[in-house]
Image: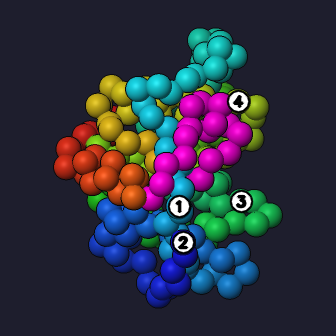
Amino acid sequence: MKYEDTNILFPEVLLLGYQNGFFPMAEDVTGRIVWHRPDPRAIIPLETVRIPRSLRAVVNKNVFDVTVNKAFEAVIERCALRDESWISDEIINAYTAIHYLGFAHSIETWQDGKLVGGLYGVSIGSAFFGESMFHTVSNASKVAFAQLIEVLKKNSFRLLDTQYINSFTEQLGAIEIPDSVYQAVLGSALKHDCSFN
């Protein structure tokens, strides 16, 4: 399900969209903002999330330094650097604005002091909406994702929304649920406040 809307992404509009199951993506060529509400919707149930043994082994080797909310702007800008990107300057500005309001977060992976991977998303209530990830070194974004799971579990989050399913999230236990079910899960998650740290 897609809805075209204005190209003005005020923080309150962006947050209201998430609270109603929508998220924006910019068209690669025109930059026009299109609101998405997939049906079915992909989520990763936190009670059954699976971290592959190979990924746990990489995490345990401490190959990367991992931080939270240390370089949000750098992460979203790196996520936008691809041949075809839905992350326009307008998207970057809007998510950076809600980051400073405490609603958008990043997890970063570093090697020798250099940012080599990370992810970002939006947190409202006890729901976390994953947006995008990047890596320049093998496994760097996957380690960031493993850290995300730790943060969400530690802080008693109830919903991890991955929007669309892909081979990596499916490996972690992602499932697709009808929009009607998603809306009920979302509504429940929004009633409980969680910290992201």
Gap between marks 2 and 3 measured at Cα: 26 Å
Q: Nearer the viewer, residue 9 or 175?
A: 175
Please state the horizontal and vertical placement of residue 15, each as a whole percent of the image: 33, 66
Please state the horizontal and vertical placement of residue 156, each as a whole percent of the image: 29, 31
Most extreme residue toward the bottom is 6
Q: Quadrant of the N terminus?
A: bottom right
Please state the horizontal and vertical placement of residue 77, each as a whole percent of the image: 61, 59
Q: Is residue 30 above or below residue 111?
A: below
- Identify the residue at horizontal 55%, vertical 40% (top origin): 175
Assign a secondary structure to mark 1: loop
Which residue is label 3 attached to?
Answer: 81
The mark found on residue 143 in the picture is: none
Q: Are marks 2 and 1 in contact (CB under 8 Å)?
A: yes
Q: Nearer the viewer, mark 2 or mark 3?
A: 2
Q: Nearer the viewer, mark 4 or mark 2?
A: 2
Q: How many marks?
A: 4
Please state the horizontal and vertical placement of residue 62, each as a whole percent of the image: 60, 16
Indicate the amino acid at tag 4: Asn
Question: Considering only order in the chain, which callout, 1 or 2, is on the residue closer to the N terminus?
Answer: 2
Q: Which range is magenta?
A: 162-179
Gap between marks 3 and 1 measured at Cα: 28 Å
Question: Considering only order in the chain, which callout, 3 or 2, is on the residue closer to the N terminus?
Answer: 2
Q: Label 3 neighbourhood size at 10 Å, few (<14), some (14-19), many (20+)? A: few
* Way the structure is coloured: rainbow
Which residue is label 2 attached to?
Answer: 1
